[in-house]
Amino acid sequence: MPIQILAPEVASQIAAGEVVERPASVVKELLENTLDAGAGKVSVRIEQAGQRLIEVEDDGSGIPAGEMELAVERHATSKLRKADDLFHIQTLGFRGEALASIGSVSRLTITSRGKDAETGKRLMVEGGSNHAPEIIGCPVGTLVRVEDLFYNVPARLKFLKKDSTERQQIDGLLTRYALAYPQVRFSLVQDGSRALQTTGSGSRRETLAALYGVDIARQMLEVSLEETAMQVHGFTSPVGLTRSNRKEITFFVNGRWVSDGSLNSALLRAYHTYLMVGRYPLTVLFIDMDPELVDVNVHPAKAEVRFRHPEQLFSLVQRSVRRALLAYAPAPLISVPTWHTSPSLPETQPHQYGINLDWQMAADVSAEDRPELPVPQQPDAPLDTDIALPDPPVGMQHYEPPSISSGQMPILRGLGQLGNTYIVAEGPDGLYLIDQHAAHERILFERMLKQIGKQIPSQRLLQGVSFVLPPRHARLLAEQLTFLNRLGFEVEEFGVDTFRVSAVPALLGKMDPAAAVRVVVEDFEEDETPLQSRIEDRLVARICKRVAVKGGQTLSNEEQLALLRDLEACQSPRTCPHGRPTMIHLSVDLLERQFGRRGSR
Ligand code: ADP
Ligand code: MG
């Protein structure tokens, strides 16, 4: 084909693709415009996950009637004049591309009245072409309606994620901006139901409570560290409050939500040795610095930025978070290991620990808000880094890390408990270290799964307990009620964002009933609604994680042995329901080589 200049519609659709990838990116651009316009109140309405309608209304400065047509032109902006301004950007927008891009892939209607104008003006853009504008009466501020997004780009429509995913993206976006701008009153309505509402009181902790619930808001630790060139403020979770992914880690730089791998690592480094592998904190940090120290013009959607002094920033982030953690939990980690060697114990014992442990569990879970004991990183690390084995002797040819073969486990003889966390046991072929928490999780998990088909023992409450959830969580819980009710819960909707629980699985019987529901709802938002059985597995795994005996908890000899026997009876005794190992095996062979008895020299 000969070289040709692209037709304007084609060129603008290509350009639009960079800025508006999905409904959530439209919402983000429109939100940024309201904040740049100094809005005090921002209302967002979404239908069909943004595909049918995205409507954003603000009470900001409005668009002057004479500039309305310009606003929807590409590279038209009121926020930048010359190239040099790019390095002093104080606004969220500056590329002048959003409205033009949105207008080229949807039916866009902008209604706006400038703050000094008598009347307002309405302009409609359909697939990139403007209709004739009208003069109309309207309040000061701007209302942008985006209908039928991507109606003229069928290929893009095909790539959109499931509605539930898009909805969660939009929820997440509003949540972040609401936290970043606590002085703004945000509301979000999705398909007619309120998903989020903040007061605009200016208090971040209050906003946290509106978004995540009072419980989490109360637990979050305050982060604050100021240096001459940069400041960090925000919140981060104590070590006992974690998530299984990084989605709840958020950074704002000069009021802009950015994603940056190295900021993430700086944060996680602050938690080093405090978190189990695969667990992540909930964090939202607001970083402020001279606009000249950050280049915001490196990404079409402005989601990534570049820092002039990255090391200084990362160190600040790490120190600020570490300091917050230490102020809260100065006592480190696990106590000194103690050995209770009792080689004369009989091989089998009656299953007494069922009673004992149940009792201990109850004691443990009733202290609902108490963070889990910080467990050092090792228990969940990959096997070969799991224990500090000495370096292999020089010249040793075939060094193999301790291994676990797949399948069943041999009969073990319990020797004692190590660090109140691991059970030390002898097997026919060497030494085993069993992670008591992971092992108990596995035992409970298999038991409960077996019961699902029949009936999970459930404990009826004398009186139903009702509780209110933040709107976002309420919607997620409502979607999962059928699953919960198959797991021994009896939960029903009981008004706006309100639920009533009248029975809980017997395993969770000792816990405050509302807290018991929260245990399983907590991480819902991370789920992508897979097959039914998988959801049930995950919910069960969550329950078991919560009630399983913890690391750091002393077990009597009988309890240790009963745990071993129960683990042996499991189908997959070697991993916990989350896939981490329950045990480490040091074979006789390995020990002999390590002691230089064989094979090495
Ligand atoms: P940018 O935000 O990068 O300038 P946009 O395409 O998002 O580009 O918007 C173009 C212009 O339209 C903005 O510069 C601003 O002057 C005006 N505008 C857009 N949305 C609003 C709004 N909600 N309130 C006031 N002015 C707005
Ligand atoms: Mg903009």
Image (cartoon, helix red, strand yellow):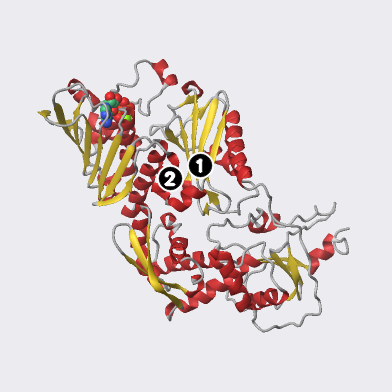
Q: Earlier in the sequence, mark 2 or mark 1?
A: 2
**Residue at the spot of label 2:** 208
Alpha carbons under labels 2 and 1: distance apart: 9 Å
In the rendered image, the quadrant that contains the C terminus is bottom right
156 left or right of 597 in image: left
- Between 126 and 25, the one lying in front of the other is 25
Q: Is residue 97 visible?
A: no
**Residue at the spot of label 1:** 235
Three-letter amino acid code at the position of disc 2: Leu
146 left or right of 275 in image: left
Name which residue lies at 48% across and 21% down.
292
In the rendered image, the quadrant that contains the N terminus is top left
Classify 36 as above or below 154.
Answer: above
Query: Percent from the top left, x then y, of residue 570?
Result: 59, 76
| Number of numbered discs overlaid on the protein picture | 2
Res 456 → quadrant: bottom left
